[in-house]
Amino acid sequence: MNKKPIVWTIAGSDSGGGAGIQADLATFNDFSVHGCTVITALTAQNSVAVSAIEATPVAHIQAEIAALNTDLPATAIKLGMLFNHEIINTVADFVAGLTIPVVCDPVMISTSGSLLLDEGARSSLIDRLFPHCSLITPNIPEAEALTSMVASSPEKIEEMAEVILASGAAAVLIKGGHNHFSPDNQGLDGNYCYDFFIDKQQRFWLRGDLIDNGNNHGSGCTLSSAIAALLARGLDIEDAVTAAKAYISEGIDAGEQLGQSHGPIAHMGFPSKSQHLPKLFKQFPKTKKIAFVREVDKLGLYPVVDSSEWVARLLSLGVKTIQLRVKDLSGDALRAEVEHVVALSQQYQARLYINDYWQLAIDCGAYGVHLGQEDLDDASVEAIAAAGLRLGVSTHAWSELARAHAIGPSYIAIGPIYSTTTKEMRFGPQGLQQLSQWLQVTMPCYPVVAIGGIDLPRAIEVNKTGVGSIALVSAITKAKDWRLATEQLIAAVGTGHS
């Protein structure tokens, strides 16, 4: 039996309960990790103001760390309010020898305007601590203070993130709740909040709806602690950031005023609402929205095959949705194959998706195109949409869901649900629990196709999740009796309907 991951928060206490240690522990609970605390400062605050701060003596902070480290070693650590350079140096000395994720929220100024970082501590934060951190998560004012720059445009925010990354941190996320750019000076839609992520391998923007709720106290603490919890649970950093963005949006949306001023964000459990799934863009989005025709709600059985022979066989048995995935043809032979399957699909009035070869699909008048994440880098989704074709997109993780969401495809495929040998995968099996979780945030917007390692018994179990669309490969083409296997699968999951 796997033990629950242990996540530490090294931060200040918020006596009002909305931020700091208190918000971190509530967040850890939502993500089913065990939270431990190293308290760096005590604050006297409420929803109106911070009236007093008392730093924890360094010797006591060292004792807190030692006590935890001998019995409850961390799987990941979140750093919050560190207040002065003595505390920063103490924490830096400890995390310098760690190989676990360390997420640093460089708390400098409270929402009410109180200074939460001692004068002169900025250089210690950058020089001593950042080089040992997996991720730095400043908001706009904090990023400006760290870089002595002004976040006046998306390009400037990217430049600021590069400066912070150069300090030695492994990754940077600049939170966009205080974006200075607006429709007036950038020609942008002001109804969105834009966050920018960068590490040494990738960069992307996350866009979410700008939520008009002033009860957002503790949002920064909560976001960074959510990322730390998700990293502790084994998510890659881009997926942890994306899922945490959805979580924080749900919390802000449900925030409630409890005192005289701004209330805290709510802690709603693992993200589950489709309207809060962010959209991921590799470049800042300035183009017009792409519009794809939404697929029917349930595609039913969705075989993926490699030849027109298989297409003909399965359509003759009543299959209504099918995908051609050809890997060993090119040139005129490939075009002839695509033209043939398009004619077959029209003869049987079926939905035919062409995998990867989007231009051929357009040229030959196919019903739709299916693209993997790597194909999105090269394909023109604008041309596919303009031609009136449907588009399906493969996803395997939170960040890929968000990238697909940014395109607005006809359907989203999720997998592998079970282990598969049909192609090389960097993702392990997701399982039915993960599929059910993702259905909550995707199905209200898109039909979802489950794929990966599914045979007849598994198809029956997958269908119970409510997914309604099941793609498979070898369960038919490698069956002893492909005809019987197809008939049984059609009986189990159907052929689709609106």
Image (cartoon, rainbow, N blue to C red):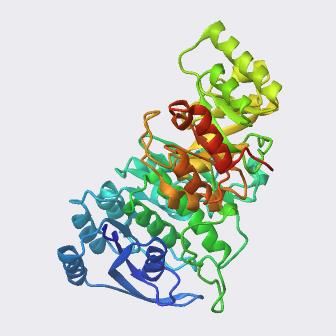
Which residue is more in the foreground, 342 or 230? 342
**Residue 182 placement (x, y as % from top left):** 73, 55
**258 in relation to 139, above or below:** below
**Residue 309 placement (x, y as % from top left):** 64, 20
Which residue is more in the foreground, 80 or 270? 270
Which residue is found at the position 38% from the left and 57% from the top? 234
**Residue 310 placement (x, y as % from top left):** 63, 25
Query: Splitting the image into 4 quarters, where does residue 65 fall?
Result: bottom left
> Does the image show residue 177?
yes
> Does the image show residue 284?
no
**363 in relation to 54, above or below:** above
**399 in relation to 100, above or below:** above
Which residue is found at the position 49% from the left and 50% from the top? 161
Q: How many marks?
A: 0
Is 41 placed left or right of 304 in the picture?
left
Which residue is found at the position 68% from the left and 77% from the top? 214
Is 195 placed left or right of 358 in the picture?
left
Which residue is found at the position 62% from the left and 63% from the top? 178
Which residue is more in the foreground, 127 or 445? 445
**Residue 473 placement (x, y as % from top left):** 55, 35
